[in-house]
Image: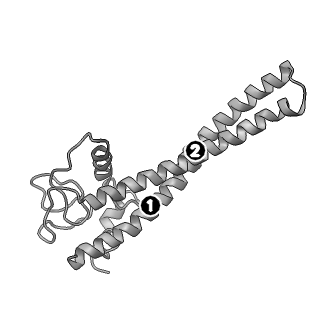
Amino acid sequence: MTEHGTAAEPAATAEEGEAGAMSTEIFSERLLGLLDDILAGDAPNAGRFCGYCYHPLAATRQICTYCGRPVAGRPVVSAVPRTLIEMHRRRRNREGLVVRTVAWGGLSIGVIVALLPLALWDVAWWSVIAFFGLLALFYLLSANLANSLGDSLGYAWGQSLVRREWAQLVKQRDSGA
């Protein structure tokens, strides 16, 4: 391992991130926001970026504030590579897929459970109230479950994709391919 980390993992300063707290995120918060804006069409893919981690750099900055590498070691780039943008798109798609699956799965179970009083007993005022009450309860449960469990599972699955593809990108980039 070099003083800046291996080719497949960010440097120690990148793991600490800009706020100094430990993070498993490969990309900086600024880069993630920019990638989201690029994908939404709200920002151009242009600027001054670290040649290693692609963190946005100020015009006078000579050392990346995210990975700690000097720009002399790997020249800055004027645009984020398309492969990195596509990697981020796949990551966001994975994250969203997990959240939506958890939400719709919980809601589907809720509909089935809510229909049980109507299917097993006569339709009466209490069974109609039970139907809507159970439906509302499962809606709230599935929304909260999607926002907690779905987010964490989706983030972990997205991170696994980014780590694998980042290692491949760095390997290709460093080999000159």
Task: From this view, report whether residue 57 is shown above or below residue 42.
Answer: below
- Name the residue at 41% across, 59% down: 23
* Residue located beneath label 1 in the image: 159
Residue 59 horizontal side relative to residue 54, left or right: left
Front-most of residues 23 and 166 = 166
Residue 72 on image: x %, y %: 11, 69
User: Element type at marker 2?
Assistant: helix
Q: Amino acid at mark 1?
A: Gln
- Name the residue at 54% across, 55% down: 153
Residue 47 seen anywhere in this rendered image of the structure: yes
Residue 81 found in image quarter:
bottom left
Cβ atoms under marks 1 and 2 closer than 8 Å:
no
Q: Amino acid at mark 2?
A: Ala
Front-most of residues 69 and 76 = 76
Crowd around label 2: few <14 · some 14–19 · many ≥20 (10 Å): many
Residue 120 on image: x %, y %: 89, 34
Residue 71 horizontal side relative to residue 154, left or right: left
Task: From this view, report whether residue 114 is shown above or below residue 36.
Answer: above
Residue 13 found in image quarter:
bottom left
Task: From this view, report whether residue 84 is shown above or below residue 126.
Answer: below
- Name the residue at 18% across, 57% down: 49
